[in-house]
Amino acid sequence: MSEQMGITTKKENFSEWFSEVCFKCNLIDLRYNVQGFVVHRPWAMKIIKKMYSLFEKELEKTGHEPVLFPVVIPEKNFIKEAEHVEEFAPEVFWITEAGDKKLEEKLALRPTSETAMYQMYSLWIRSYKDLPFKRYQSVSVFRNEKTTKPFLRGREFLWIEAHDAFATEKEIMKQINEDMIITKKIVEDHLGLPIMFFKRPQWDKFAGAVETYAADILMPDGKVNQISSTHNLGNNFSKVFDITFLDSKGEKKYAWQTCYGPGIWRMMAALIAVHGDDKGLILPFELAPIQVIIIPIKDSALKKCESIKKELEKNCIRVEIDKRDETPGWKFNDWEMKGVPIRIEIGPQEIKEKTLTLARRDNGKKYKIKEKNLIKTLKKIEKEILDNLKNKATIFLKNNIHNAKSRKEVIDIIKKGGYARINFCGREVCAKDMQNVTQGGKVRGTRADKKELATGKCAWCGGLGKEVVYVAKQY
Amino acid sequence: MSEQMGITTKKENFSEWFSEVCFKCNLIDLRYNVQGFVVHRPWAMKIIKKMYSLFEKELEKTGHEPVLFPVVIPEKNFIKEAEHVEEFAPEVFWITEAGDKKLEEKLALRPTSETAMYQMYSLWIRSYKDLPFKRYQSVSVFRNEKTTKPFLRGREFLWIEAHDAFATEKEIMKQINEDMIITKKIVEDHLGLPIMFFKRPQWDKFAGAVETYAADILMPDGKVNQISSTHNLGNNFSKVFDITFLDSKGEKKYAWQTCYGPGIWRMMAALIAVHGDDKGLILPFELAPIQVIIIPIKDSALKKCESIKKELEKNCIRVEIDKRDETPGWKFNDWEMKGVPIRIEIGPQEIKEKTLTLARRDNGKKYKIKEKNLIKTLKKIEKEILDNLKNKATIFLKNNIHNAKSRKEVIDIIKKGGYARINFCGREVCAKDMQNVTQGGKVRGTRADKKELATGKCAWCGGLGKEVVYVAKQY
């Protein structure tokens, strides 16, 4: 069966490789009969559940509490914030009937939940003592996107949305920083994916927001993937949804708000794309649904396989023995494709010598170790795998940020892929022109995690350089 | 504020009490502006997440793998199984528009996922080697119910659905038994709620199924709450959705199927209703979002409170210190209302004596213990709480099952509430008459967890008694 022949496309043909990995590793099935809606299969769901739990833990540590709002939003809520409705209305799915009856009011399937949540915030927040007020939900959202791609753009996709309200404006920037720290901690230190934070240009902010901060990951094809964002909502929405509180002097004030959206789908895309190779997925130890796969080289090794499995389970390691009726070589390939970080081979020789043969997925390295050193070795390798994946990805990112001083340089870099780092005049008209001429090179914004000052004229228009921005094609 | 005055309704006025507990304990907010759709608040979400994780763990142990199917189901899938469409069509929400355009085909918001999943099962299942094939998803489902009640009946409610396929018919009953064991293990041994399993009468089975098995919990008002069900689908759906496999002889066969639906919402309703009392919620230690609340009796106790908190956290106990600017008595009431299992009071006397004062929510018992015995004592109390809650609930259930030998006895029992246990003729017409006359007394079915033989004539019609059934009003 072709499904069992491993990945046949080279990663350099990125788009086809990505689709093949999504299908053959049992991540996604695109054959569901509603266009743009996908089926999430077990290997993806297990990784996704771990990502959710990493974020939920950090969000709860920083004072966020879980909620779940209805998936439906009445039309009247939706039209309250003018910019917001303009942006989202074209892609909203509408429920208009129940049974054989027309509904009195159309219901939107949530594309994002500001307009669902904030009417309730208005009821819940009364006094400065209720603030800060921090809530999150882990949900699917729905947007009728024209083109779709697994984990990158879908009509139903998975994320977390955290909506926070504060008594003072200055807490907004504090929260944005907290969100960036959470993102960095999980995405870099657990997923091994280096990110850059940008303050988006005014013309590219979230609909209804004062400003938008976002995290980008560079994908192997040189396009960038926005994996999360935090919006400074100011009191735009609190004025529209009447979220007020009495301050300590008894005066009525509008709350200050932020919302933070870690894109679980987008991170999954980055995890697959950045770490994977020609053979398929490469997963960090912590995220892998199966962390160690044991392959019996001969049937006579089964008993020892079982005892090793038990020992690993005692140490909370997710482990399986592959007892399928296939050759060891076939099994090696299958688990390499699926990205299982460690393979243990057990045959007659290992039994005789009381040793184990370990193989790492990330770099192919093999180890012959004494049985009694197994747990100690795994602990060490677990860290080495993450470091190796993160280092490789960091080098890739570094190698694909290029300073550009002229239109020609910008055009060449965007054509090749990666970031063009330029001095920029800060004008929307210049950004739009650049995007047109480069066929998609977008100003991602100024660095939010680092102070960078303009040192020359705008690389595009030659006007006064006001800031340093990064330009790249985006997903 | 009335919200801080605790529960004002006695539990004997069950319906009002239940609503008040749901609102005041921050479980549910009904003020969302789409009727029948509720907002889940943090105290509920934290308990619900624990319930989900208990079930997901057991399902994965028994070979189920997680999936996530789209929330939308195209109309053409929906109309494939005749009984199924007849049952669900009247309450389906339909998406008919996206942006300002009409969709080419209407999309149902999933009321249950058979018709979404089984077309994919048809693609995934090919050979007897693919079987058994067991998948589950943890999701919201949507039904346009006429009347709604938090956690009992909603237009959006939370459950798990596990859909299994087998090579042989005899595996169906094995799976139904496995599902019953999972339900019993979690609901009785973790939630402390005694259940009875029934095989539902033919006229009350799931639309499209061969037979339905279900678990009922008796609620304090004498009505029963179906908290889960498993359906024997035979090969009804596999014929409609073409789920076939080649058996070991190379012959094409239709798969045999079951689906199992643990109702997370329904269990939440039972947890609140069965264990709670006039003061509010009573939560088992394992399910409580906060397991131990520490109340400083004087400010001077804060330091010791912090060190006790640290010790508890080291032992993986969920603990908070209530530092709010309120009296200890006010705090006692507030946490009792929320059902926190253990309160620790620390004041000058406790500091002097190196002791702690513990109070149990479930029975009000107080303990004065030595500080060093804290963890040991908690471990012991944790088990005692669960045993106490389960015993109480079991006695309540026992006391509300009454043998009835005549129409009059059936009518009296159903009027009073609880189960009437009767010899029954097995005829639908008799059951319908009984339901009409008793104003809602429904035949729940024969026991699936216990063999019971009829010992006399049908208590309702006087005809031949063929089986022993239980009759009760239902939610």
Image (tube, coloured by chain):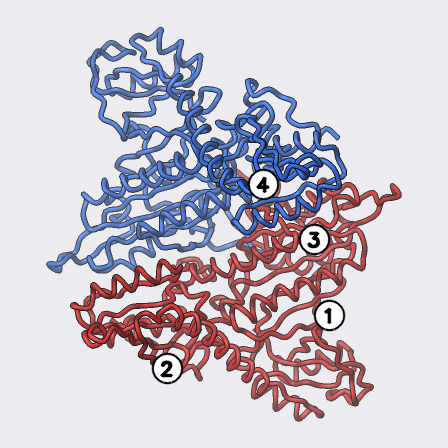
Chain colours: A red, B blue
Amino acid at pointer 4: Glu
The residue at the point 36 percent across, 45 percent down is B79
Tag 2, which secondary structure? loop
> Label 1 belongs to which residue?
A203
Q: Is residue B380 visible?
A: yes
Relative to the observer, which residue lies in front, A214 or B10? B10
| Mark pair 3, 1: CA separation | 24 Å
Quarter of the rendering containing residue A320: bottom left
Residue A141, image x, y percentages: 55, 55
Between tags 3 and 1, which lies in front? 3
Q: Earlier in the sequence, mark 2 or mark 3?
A: 3
User: Residue B38: percent from the left, percent from the top?
Assistant: 58, 39
What is the chain letter for disc 1? Answer: A
Q: Amino acid at mark 1?
A: Trp
The disc label shown at residue A365, or none? 2
Give the CA distance from mark 3 to mark 4: 39 Å
- In the picture of the structure, the residue carrying the numbered disc 4 is B371
User: Mark 2, mark 3: which one is toward the viewer?
Assistant: 2
Which residue lies at the image location 29% right of the left edge and 15% below the top edge?
B422
Q: Chain of mark 4?
A: B
Q: Nearer the viewer, residue B87 or A418?
A: A418
Left or right: A414 in relation to A168:
left
Residue visible at 34% across and 74% down in the picture? A336
The nearer-to-camera label among 2 and 1 is: 2
Dot 1 surroundings within 10 Å: few (below 14), some, or many (20 or more)? few
How many other residues sit within 10 Å of disc 2, few (<14), some (14-19) or many (≥20)? few
